[in-house]
Image (cartoon, grey):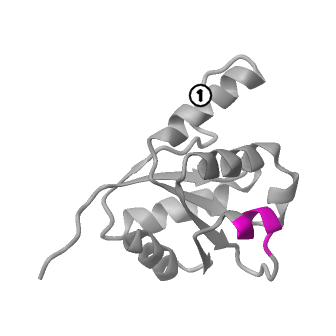
């Protein structure tokens, strides 16, 4: 049997206020057969930038290396300028975007729906299969 061990380069767009969701996804990835490199910017490893312009440049550079962007698509996304920036940069750089709908969410922000190549429910198998398909 042939296993696809192609390394996936992943950036997870998330709000630091909801770090538990980010770490859950990391746990799912770590317990899957996916070989990946994480280009995300978690709260425990922030970018070193002194102002908004430098932060945007550094964030774009991180994202440039990814071929998949996962967006944790809670309704709070509507109120996060940084997540909006990451979505716009993902689209500009033609990244494949997987939106993951948090538990209990019925609606997704329009900007996320519009940008996503694939939308999955909050489920490890659904996310892993979507990543493998890209």
Is label 1 in a helix, a strand or a loop? helix
> Which residue is rendered at x = 14% and y = 77% of the image?
2
Which residue occupies the extreme right position in the image?
79
**Residue 115, above or below 53:** below
Q: Nearer the viewer, residue 19 or 8?
A: 8
Q: Nearer the viewer, residue 89 or 83?
A: 89
User: How far from the left and from the top, in percent, is residue 123?
Assistant: 56, 80
> Which residue is rendered at x = 75% and y = 43% of the image?
82
Residue 105 seen in the figure: yes
| Most common secondary structure along the magenta stretch | helix
In which quadrant of the rendered view does residue 120 lie? bottom right
- Quadrant containing the C terminus is bottom left
> Mark 1 — residue?
58
Q: Is residue 46 magenta?
A: no
> Which residue is rendered at x = 82% and y = 44% of the image?
81
Q: Residues within 10 Å of mark 1 (few under 14, many from 20)?
A: some
- Read off the magenta span: 108-114
- Quadrant containing the N terminus is bottom left
User: How far from the left and from the top, in percent, is residue 115?
Assistant: 67, 63
Q: Is residue 112 magenta?
A: yes
Q: Nearer the viewer, residue 92 or 50?
A: 92
User: How far from the left and from the top, in percent, is residue 80?
Assistant: 82, 49
In which quadrant of the rendered view does residue 103 lie? bottom right
> Which residue is rendered at x = 73% and y = 44% of the image?
85
User: How far from the left and from the top, in percent, is residue 64?
Assistant: 50, 39
In which quadrant of the rendered view does residue 69 lie? bottom right
């Amino acid at each position: 049997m042939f296993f696809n061990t192609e390394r996936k380069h992943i950036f997870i767009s998330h709000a630091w206020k909801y770090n538990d969701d980010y770490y859950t996804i990391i746990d799912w990835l770590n317990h899957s057969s996916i070989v990946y490199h994480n280009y995300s910017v978690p709260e425990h490893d922030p970018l070193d930038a002194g102002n908004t312009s430098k932060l945007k440049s550094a964030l774009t550079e991180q994202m440039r290396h990814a071929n998949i962007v996962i967006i944790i698509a809670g309704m709070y996304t509507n109120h996060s300028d940084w997540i909006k920036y990451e979505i716009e940069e993902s689209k500009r750089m033609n990244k494949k975007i997987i939106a993951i709908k948090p538990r209990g969410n019925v609606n997704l922000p329009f900007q996320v729906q519009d940008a996503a190549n694939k939308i999955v429910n909050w489920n490890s198998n659904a996310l892993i299969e979507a990543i493998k398909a890209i």
